[in-house]
Amino acid sequence: MASGKKYKGEPAKKQERAGAGAPSSSERVRDSAERMTNRGAERSRKNTSGSLALIATPIGNSADISLRALDTLRKAELIFCEDTRQTQKLLMMHGITGKKLVAAHQHNEAAAAKKILEEINAGKTIAYASDAGLPLISDPGETIMQVMIEEGVNVTSIPGANAALTALQLSGLPPLPFYFAGFLPPKTKARKDALKLLHSIPATLVFYEAPHRLAETLADMLAVLGNRHAAYARELTKMHEEVQRGTLSELSKHTEKQERIRGECVICIAPPDAETAQHDDADEIDKLLLSALQTLSPRDAAFDVAAKTGQQRRALYQRILELKSNTR
Ligand code: SAM
């Protein structure tokens, strides 16, 4: 059974969930590019000395923070962060005191972005940190970033730890190309639907997952993607760091046997082999055609599926005729 429980690290509304009705990445890129062109890109940098730095923070081991990140936090006049308690702890650990922290999380990000802008226009140097790893990457920061771009504010990133790339390095799977899908939906039906959309992507797939959903997610991955090679990484950079490698079937059995899995996880899955991908594509297209034919004429069904898949309309129409003659 899928658990609908919300996991602490899992964004409630963020749009990176694969196939959860969110705009596609190309739509988002296009929207963002339009906004930049229309309102911001041609605008020169505002005449203030204020600036914003996105700070990468540790994903488990508090020593994994760069000298530049610490220096930037030390010099920042104001620190916006996902959780003030979490960032305060990090600052204390590194002897940084007397800083004003302001919350900027997924529930107040638009208002926080406005505040950041006001402070920058008043000449302040601002830092932004999420709870762990890189801001924006399955974490808040996207709205802030968009507002800064629209307003022509200079933003820099202080790079550092990231769970997805660390897991990919350790997975033993082809590192390139990879496709980072973030969190899948928490419920089985939506999760399987999202996985179907990723089925034929010729890249290593990388997902974030909560420990209490690891077993059921691996089982859904096995059901939808087939028995591919995979790996999951748990507790990266921490004392009990663990990487399990095997087929999805082996990993699924392994996690089912465990009473309770602790710690945050990243799942990496090998790309489909070329033959499977081709075969799966054809199967998938047949399914789309048959479903379209339930409500549309053959001509319109070919149009519809061509628009969805980028396949040639004429070839799809031909395939419809074949499918029809097979069912006679
Ligand atoms: N911004 C972060 C980054 O750059 O990696 C990701 C934040 S996201 C809210 C939290 C998810 O990242 C967790 O649920 C888990 O899937 C993954 N994660 C974070 N830290 C991890 C760790 N130490 N080991 C394994 N996975 C981790």
Image (cartoon, grey):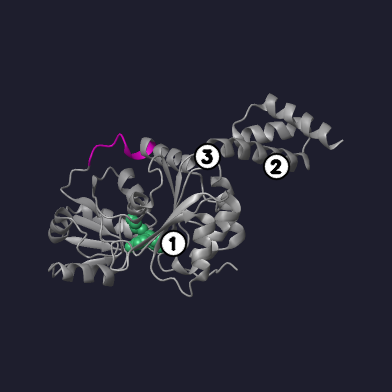
Picture coordinates of residue 305 (x, y %)?
66, 35
- Indicate which disc residue 287 carries: 2
Q: Residue at x 78, y 30 (%)?
A: 322
CB of mark 1 near ligand 1 (< 8 Å)? yes
Crowd rating for badge 2 (residues with CA inside 10 Å; few <14, some 14–19, many 20+): few
Given the image, on which type of amino acid does mark 3 rest?
Asp
Left or right of residue 3: residue 87? left
Residue range corresponding to the magenta coloring: 38-45
Q: Are marks 2 and 1 in contact (CB under 8 Å)?
A: no
Which of label 3 and label 1 is nearer to you? 3
Residue 153 appears anywhere in the view: yes
Q: Position of residue 155 (x, y in %)?
A: 25, 47
In-image side of 65 versus 311 (left or right): left
Disc 3 from disc 1: Cα separation: 32 Å
| Residue 11: numbered disc | 1
Q: Residues within 10 Å of mark 1 (few under 14, many from 20)?
A: some
The residue mark sitting in front, 2 or 1, is: 2
Percent from the top left, x then y, of residue 302? Answer: 71, 31
- The residue that disc 3 covers is 273
Quadrant of the rendered image containing residue 83? bottom left
Residue 326, above or below 80: above
Specify whether tag 2 is near ligand 1 (CB below 8 Å): no
